[in-house]
Image (spheres, grey):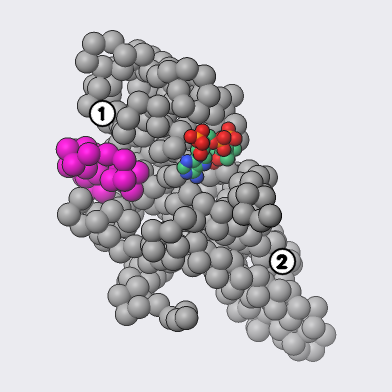
Amino acid sequence: MDLRLSTEQQMIVDAVRDFAQGRLAPRAAEVDATGVFPLDAIRECAALGLCAMNVPEDAGGTGVGPVAAALAIQELARADASISVTQSVTNMVAEAIWRFGNPDQWRRFIPMAAAGDYPIGAFVLTEPGAGSDATAQKTTAVLDGDAYVINGTKNFITSAAYAGVFIVMARAGKQGSKGISAFLVERGAPGMRVGKEEDKMGLRGSNTAELVFENCRVPVENRLGEEGIGFKVAMSALDGGRINVASQALGIARAALRDAVEYAKTREAFGKPIAELQAIQWKIADMATQLDAAEMLILRAAWLKQEKRPYTREASMAKLYSTEAANRAVKEALQVLGGYGYCRDYPLERYFRDCKVTTIYEGTSEIQRLVIARHTLAMIG
Ligand code: CAA
């Protein structure tokens, strides 16, 4: 057993950390305050090869592998969680195109997520009536000659207004999971428009909006995989996405722990730095221990994925534990800073707002428990 990173993995982490701390962290508060989508920073991420990290180089990605990719997402989140979610979803989309697409689709669509003016992918699954119950898709895709005609409304779509390519799940067949197919739709496709943009509590530098499909014609050759496998495309993409959301939460919480420790060493109360008070030390000990446990779960899931072994259960465990632990840690770190933590002069309140959604999107904590329980019940006995 060897828990060390390879030289290449360490180099990737160091490079992303330098970029994220140098370029993203200094403007994260401004991005949060203005809510302006940082497209220029996303383009810099693309130039660094951070959009298709699990896609091999010969298919248009950087092929660094799931372990390095998870660590890179963590580094982005330590600097600016909004950028980390945009990158996390983009990577999920690029990888799904590679995994389920044909070489022609790789050539056409992976560059739309990894290069160009809008190097961003969007994963279009959720509907007003199909969130946790993702099988309840109402959006339809009806075959008409050489194209599918898509109609319906999707909501809470990350990067809906900025993506270059969209993987759209829609019902092309009967009810249930086997009636769902996946389609590749380009930015600007006639019949696809951005609806209401959400005014969110956190991740204010990421874009989340409704997408409306009104007789949107998608050529048959844009179907991703066979008809009827769309739900499997979505679920297996989410397996990987959940590792990255876990990493995102961990990155936010590591930033919070760092800020709490720095503050505790300099803030004095009762005649000494509060870091010398046991009440504060216990908080720091719990945060540090739980964040390391989260990291171990994330790395295990990423390693299994890298080894091409099953990892659905482990990805859900990593997401459940890391996002819940990160929320606890951010709350405790804010408590260490007291009144200062509650004010916008310090980033703790932003971490608090940014972290919350990690227990909600890409499957709530309750859905992760459902997945873990189903697998565990099937494994034992
Ligand atoms: N990989 C491959 N196939 C899978 C799978 C996986 N991980 N999980 C399920 N499947 C397959 C099953 O094997 C089954 O196929 P068969 O019938 O051939 O056996 C089929 O899919 C249906 O599976 P279930 O019976 O388990 O389906 P279910 O209706 O019980 O739902 C669920 C399962 C786990 C609850 C699922 O609906 C789910 O994950 N819900 C949460 C949805 C979610 O995470 N949404 C996130 C939106 S995207 C987002 O948030 C991105 C963002 O913007 C940040």
As drawn, the label of residue 278 is: none
Please state the horizontal and vertical placement of residue 266, each as a whole percent of the image.
Answer: 65, 83
Query: Which residue is found at the position 27% from the left and 60% from the top?
Result: 63
Q: Which amino acid does label 1 sit on?
A: Asn
Residue at x 36%, y 50% (from the top left corner): 91
Q: Where is residue 335 in the image (x, y as percent from the top left)?
A: 73, 66
**Circle 2 sits in a helix, a strand or a loop, which is it?**
helix
Q: In this view, does 2 lie above or below 203?
A: below
| Residue in the image at 44% along x and 37% along y | 232
Residue plotted at (17% across, 54% down): 58
Q: Main secondary structure of the magenta part?
A: helix
Q: Are marks 1 and 2 in contact (CB under 8 Å)?
A: no
**Foreground residue among 122 and 125:** 125
Q: Can you tell which quarter of the image residue 11 is in?
A: bottom left
Magenta includes 107?
A: yes
Please state which amino acid type lies under the numbered disc 2: Glu
* Residue 318 in which image quadrant: bottom right
The location of residue 104, given as percent across then percent down, is 17, 38
Q: Which of marks 1 and 2 is in front?
A: 1
Residue at the spot of label 1: 222
Give the residue furthest to the front.
381
Residue at far right of view: 270
Q: Is mark 1 on a helix, strand or loop?
A: helix
**In the rendered structure, which disc, 1 or 2, sits on the residue that comes first in sequence?**
1
Residue 1 vertical placement versus 100 (above, below): below
Disc 1 from disc 2: Cα separation: 48 Å
Residue tagged by mark 2?
332
Q: Give the range drawn in magenta.
A: 94-118
